[in-house]
Image (cartoon, rainbow, N blue to C red):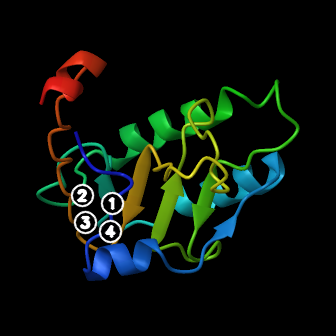
Amino acid sequence: MRDTNGPLPDTPFWHAYNGRFAGIPTWDGFDRFWQVFAASGGDWYVFDPSGEAPAGPETDLAEVLAEAHACVDQVRRMRSYCGAVFADDLANPGFVKVFDPWKMGGVCGGSGERVMPRWIFSRIAPDALPLLPDEPEKKGLFARIIG
């Protein structure tokens, strides 16, 4: 499992990840942005932070974009706001974070745990997060008392 709460690697990708992003709060804004994003062309790396970093740019970007769009769009009838997509530049994106709206949790940081996007689209080659160390075995009260 990848460590989503440890320090992020000190690499250009993770520095860009922590950069300035604009959120897309409205559904109209989401629709306008998605058209710009889908038409942006060029090479995009698609990264699921819970797994390995991709070896190269996505070869079937249209399919991944459709999957990410459908994931966000599934809550359109239930919520008056979007709030699951963030981009470094809405007019000319180079880094886009797409959260699963069902798994956003405390994105504002109230829970103390980092919530990672479901998809990260980037022009920069990503670096995987470090693996979590194995958790120490939890001992019961009796085992702790006798050593």
Q: Earlier in the sequence, mark 2 or mark 1?
A: 1
Which mark is in front, 1 or 3? 1
Q: Are marks 1 and 4 in contact (CB under 8 Å)?
A: yes
Query: Mark 3: which amino acid?
Result: Pro
Calculate the distance from the C-alpha at mark 2 to the C-alpha at mark 1.
9 Å
Which mark is in front, 2 or 1? 1
Q: Are marks 2 and 1 in contact (CB under 8 Å)?
A: yes
Calculate the distance from the C-alpha at mark 1 to the C-alpha at mark 3.
17 Å
Query: Mark 1: which amino acid?
Result: Gly
Calculate the distance from the C-alpha at mark 3 to the C-alpha at mark 2.
9 Å
Q: Are marks 4 and 2 in contact (CB under 8 Å)?
A: yes
Element on which disc 1 rests = loop
Read off the residue under disc 1: 6
Identify the image quadrant of the N terminus: top left
Q: Seen from this angle, which residue lies furthest front?
A: 146
Near mark 4 (Cα within 10 A), the count class, few <14, some 14-19 or many ≥20, is some
Which mark is in front, 1 or 4? 1
* Residue at the (62%, 36%) spot, across then down: 101
Read off the residue under disc 3: 126
Query: Mark 2: which amino acid?
Result: Leu
Read off the residue under disc 2: 129
Q: Are marks 3 and 4 in contact (CB under 8 Å)?
A: no
Residue 62 percent coordinates (x, y) = 40, 44
Identify the image quadrant of the C terminus: top left
